[in-house]
Image (cartoon, grey):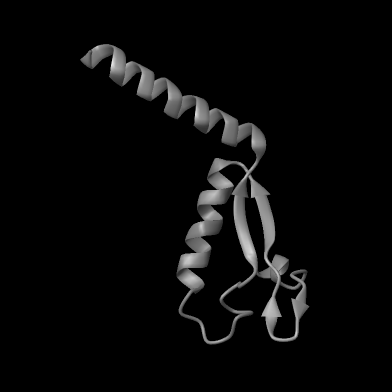
Amino acid sequence: MTELQRYVPKVGDTFITVPCHGDGTSVERMRECLRQRSMELTPEDQLVGLEPTPQEFHHRGNVMKVRSNNYTLKSTTG
């Protein structure tokens, strides 16, 4: 993610948020990296402007899983 930081556009002192697409595991790793770097001194070192987002395929799979779990929960309890 440090390599990606240099491609984040900057207007004055403000970074513009850029989505970083990846599969579920990659997004989890990106978020963990951002948590670990959150106490750094400069915004560049904190990786400000990088927003981990799951790819649409994986996002749809997660939505389907949640819907399936909700349906299963309702059908077994009711």
- Say whether residue 1 is visible: no
Front in this rendered view, residue 1 or 77: 77
View extreme (left): residue: 77
Whole-percent x and y of residue 53? 61, 50
Q: Residue furthest front?
A: 78
- 21 w.r.t. 69: above or below: below
Q: Is residue 69 left or right of residue 61?
A: left
Of 70 and 23, the residue lying toward us: 70
| 50 sits to left or right of 12 | left
Q: Is residue 47 above or below residue 65?
A: below
Residue plotted at (75% across, 77% down): 10
Q: Position of residue 67 (x, y in %)?
A: 44, 24
**Residue located 22% across and 16% down the image:** 77
Quarter of the rendering containing residue 20: bottom right
Q: Residue 52 at what x, y percent from top left?
A: 60, 55
Horizontal and vertical percent position of residue 70: 36, 24
Q: Quadrant of the C terminus?
A: top left
- Write the residue at 46% across / 26% down: 65
Which residue is at a point 61% across and 41% down the rendered structure image?
23
Answer with the quarter of the image where residue 47 lies.
Answer: bottom right
